[in-house]
Amino acid sequence: MKRTLVECKELFVGISLIMIYRCAYRKAVAVVRSLPFKIEKPEDLKNVREIGQKIREKIIEIVKTGRLKKADILTVTLETHFS
């Protein structure tokens, strides 16, 4: 039982962090959508100050690969825990 409670606590902490990240991602999406140009290369983000460094790195990953590894991992994790 103790193990299960610890796992639940860890999941809830993870979910809380997801909610915090969600706000940051929502802001970044709004900024990207408002840009008068399409982001096609990392240099396109050079003068976009409203996006923080960590999310900027994720946008660059998406531009380069068409995917975001963190999103893929999170999807698999959620499917594993909640299916």
Image (cartoon, helix red, strand yellow):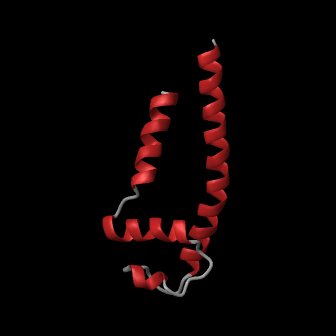
65 sits left or right of 19 in the view: left
Q: Quadrant of the N terminus?
A: top right
59 sits left or right of 15 in the view: left
Out of 19 and 10, give the one closest to the viewer: 10
Residue 10: image x %, image y %?
61, 33
- What residue is drawn where x is 37% and y is 80%? 41
Residue 58: image x %, image y %?
46, 65
- What residue is drawn where x is 39% and y is 66%? 61
Q: Quadrant of residue 29?
A: bottom right
72 sits left or right of 32 in the view: left
Out of 9 and 41, give the one closest to the viewer: 9
Out of 22 and 46, give the one closest to the viewer: 46
Residue 70: image x %, image y %?
44, 52
Q: Residue furthest left?
A: 65
Residue 48: image x %, image y %?
56, 83
Q: Quadrant of residue 73?
A: top left
Q: Residue furthest top?
A: 1
Tally the marks: 0
- What residue is drawn where x is 50% and y is 71%? 56
- What residue is drawn where x is 67% and y is 53%? 20
